[in-house]
Every structure is written in structure tokens, then in C-alpha cells.
């Protein structure tokens, strides 16, 4: 009996696990939760690097672009604008060979690649990619670091960044403004789009056919006009604190001062990466250029209301509730 008890006890006693290796967490491939961890620790993945990965995913960063110049435009290019590019400036000392390559932010790249290094060494960094860490800024920084180490003429494959890795705020020159250029199509994918043939040309044609016409509204920060078959829209990314902005919009809407002219209407807002994006319906004949003056006048009214906050009246509270009920979260 004593021997059987001892045998059972020995069966219950777990074997000592080998010491985990010092492998880079970001280089550990994802496997099944109950499979051995690829790092060689001898533990199951869910109890080893899988736990780090799960913890990293849970750490959702609400404003991943906060601290970057042009935060609102980062949000717009991530969620609202189909085709756009913007030059980026790296911090000094990032390039291993001392030569700083050209880096361009792009809304989306072929095959949804995180990044692409062209044959001439120039880097395209894709913004509209799947986030795996809960921090879009860390995902983009990891793709950028991979691109810097990638041989020219190759794309950067997706992967999960290492917990605690750098963010864009650590890699970019924060004194350089973000200056987006909106495109009507994705010809910027290729160094010579006119030379595209076969599958490449077909892929480019399909992508271009799906683009919703979008333009920047000049004179305004982070305001984008877009056209659809039924009506046009103005989508304006704002950095004001959400609660204060919603109060101000409710006050203006209740007073009949939230429109951009005849036939226009403030219909609600998006919430995207910690910022609020009011949306107006526009008549089909109203172009991006037509939005400039009325939107600038609205910006003045909004600034005045934000500068003099007051408790909302019952009618204003009802208007605010309507705006909140129609709010959609992106990203």
C-alpha cells in the first residue's frame, strides 16, 4: 500500500522544467496553447510566451498616436482615408550603416503588408494593418524596424512585436510635421505604375475601383471630404476631449448652428483611437472646396462654445444623447 501511494505521489509531482532560454519574445512563433513553447523552456506555450502574448494583447492603448505630430491625421489615415501617403523623418542614429533611407507612410500596401522595402532602399510603412499587440504604435514601430533590417526589394511579413518594444514615438523625429497627400488611387505602390502588367496591373485596377473619392479640406486640420453615390460627407477628426466636444456639439445643434449650410446636417460621430470624429451629411453638389468657408465658420462657433462651457439644458441633453446613440467606434 505504501509503495502504491508513493508511486501515485511521484506521478503527481511535476518534473522540473528546463530553464527558459533568453530568446527574443517577439521572435517566438505562435503555436497552440497546450503545445510545447517554441522557446525550448519545456513548458506549454500558454504558460510561457503565450502568457506574455495574451498579456500584451490585453494592454489596449486608447490613443496610440498621442505625442506624434499630426495625431488627428494619423487617425484619419488609419481609419477614414483610403489612399494617402506622408513622408516620415527618423530619429538620427537609427540606420545601422549611417545612411538614413527614405520612409513614407502609406494608408495600405499590397497584400496588407506591414511594410515594404523597395529595390532602391526606400521604405513604405503600411498604416491600415492588423494590430496584434493592442498598441498600433508598437506594431508600426516593429514593422519599421524590420524594414530597416530588410534587404531591398522585399516586403516585411506580419508578426507579433515583442512586449515592451519601441513605439513610433521612439523612432520618429517628433519635430517633423506630418503632411499627408491624398491620392485618387494606389499607383504609389509601384515605382513605375505605368509599367505594371499581368496580375500586378489587375490587382492595382481592383484596388483603385474600390476607392471612395476622398479629399482634404484645405484650411482645416484633419478634415476630409468624401463622395458616395447617394450623398457626400465631411469627416473631421478633432483632438478636443470627447465629453467637452459632445457638450459643445449638442449646444450648437440645439441652437441650429451645427450645420455647414443649406442641405447639410451633423449626423453623429465616430470614436477612433481616442479621438472624436464628427460627421456631416452633405448634398451631392457640395465639393471639398465648397466646405472650406462654412467649416471654418463652424470652427469659430465651436471654439467659442468650448471656451465658455455651461451646464446643458434639458433640450441640449436630449440632443447630446442622440449624438452619443449614433456614435460608432472604429479600430
Image (tube, rainbow, N blue to C red):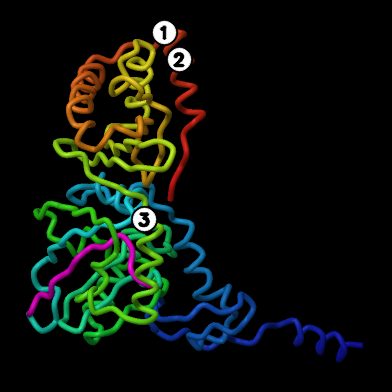
Q: Secondary structure at mark 2?
A: helix
Residue shown at the point (23%, 67%) measured from the top left: 188
Residue highlighted by disc 1: 313
Q: Secondary structure at mark 3?
A: loop
Q: Secondary structure at mark 1?
A: loop
* Viewer-nearest residue: 304 or 76: 76
Quadrant location, the N terminus? bottom right
- Say if mark 2 contacts mark 1, CB within 8 Å: yes
In three-dimensional space, the C-alpha distance between marks 2 and 1, rounded to whole angstroms, equals 6 Å
| Mark closest to the chain's N terminus, 2 or 3 | 3
Residue highlighted by disc 3: 211
Residue shown at the point (23%, 87%) measured from the top left: 151
Residue reaching furthest to the right: 1
Check residue 102 for magenta coloring: yes
Q: Quadrant of residue 46?
A: bottom right
Residue 317 got which mark? Answer: 2
Q: Can you give x and y, in whole percent of width and height, for residue 300 in the image?
A: 18, 21
Check residue 124 for magenta coloring: no
In three-dimensional space, the C-alpha distance between marks 2 and 3, rounded to whole angstroms, equals 38 Å
Q: In this picture, is 210 found above or below 118?
A: above
Residue shown at the point (42%, 42%) measured from the top left: 229
Within 10 angstroms of label 1, few (less than 14), some, or many (20 or more) residues? few
66 relative to 249 in the view: left or right: left
Q: Can you give x and y, in whole percent of width and height, for residue 236 in the image?
A: 29, 37
Q: Can you give x and y, in whole percent of width and height, for residue 283 in the image?
A: 35, 30
Amino acid at each position: 500500500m505504501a509503495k502504491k501511494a508513493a508511486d501515485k505521489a511521484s506521478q503527481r509531482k511535476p518534473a522540473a522544467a528546463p530553464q527558459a532560454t533568453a530568446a527574443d519574445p517577439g521572435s517566438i512563433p505562435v503555436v497552440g496553447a497546450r503545445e510545447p513553447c517554441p522557446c525550448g523552456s519545456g513548458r506549454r506555450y500558454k504558460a510561457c510566451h503565450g502568457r506574455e502574448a495574451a498579456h500584451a494583447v490585453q494592454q489596449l492603448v486608447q490613443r496610440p498616436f498621442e505625442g506624434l505630430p499630426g495625431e488627428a491625421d494619423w487617425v484619419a489615415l488609419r481609419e477614414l482615408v483610403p489612399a494617402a501617403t506622408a513622408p516620415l523623418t527618423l530619429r538620427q542614429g537609427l540606420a545601422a550603416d549611417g545612411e538614413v533611407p527614405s520612409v513614407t507612410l502609406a494608408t495600405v500596401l499590397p497584400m496588407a503588408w506591414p511594410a515594404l522595402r523597395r529595390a532602391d532602399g526606400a521604405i513604405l510603412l503600411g498604416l491600415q494593418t492588423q494590430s496584434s499587440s493592442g498598441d498600433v504604435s508598437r506594431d508600426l514601430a516593429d514593422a519599421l524596424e524590420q524594414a530597416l533590417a530588410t534587404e531591398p526589394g522585399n516586403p516585411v511579413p506580419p508578426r507579433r512585436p515583442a512586449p515592451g518594444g519601441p513605439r513610433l514615438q521612439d523612432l520618429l523625429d517628433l519635430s517633423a510635421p506630418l503632411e499627408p497627400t491624398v491620392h485618387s488611387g494606389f499607383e504609389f505602390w509601384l515605382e513605375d505604375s505605368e509599367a505594371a502588367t499581368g496580375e500586378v496591373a489587375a490587382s492595382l485596377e481592383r484596388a483603385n475601383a474600390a476607392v471612395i473619392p476622398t479629399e482634404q479640406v484645405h484650411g482645416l486640420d484633419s478634415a476630409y471630404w468624401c463622395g458616395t453615390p447617394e450623398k457626400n460627407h465631411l469627416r473631421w477628426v478633432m483632438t478636443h476631449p470627447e465629453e467637452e466636444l459632445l457638450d459643445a456639439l449638442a449646444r450648437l445643434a440645439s441652437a441650429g448652428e451645427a450645420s455647414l449650410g443649406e442641405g447639410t446636417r451633423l449626423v453623429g460621430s465616430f470614436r477612433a483611437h481616442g479621438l472624436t470624429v464628427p460627421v456631416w451629411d452633405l448634398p451631392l453638389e457640395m465639393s471639398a472646396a465648397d466646405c472650406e468657408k462654412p467649416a471654418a465658420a463652424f470652427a469659430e462657433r465651436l471654439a467659442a462654445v468650448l471656451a465658455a462651457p455651461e451646464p446643458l439644458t434639458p433640450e441640449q441633453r436630449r440632443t447630446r444623447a442622440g449624438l452619443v446613440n449614433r456614435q460608432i467606434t472604429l479600430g
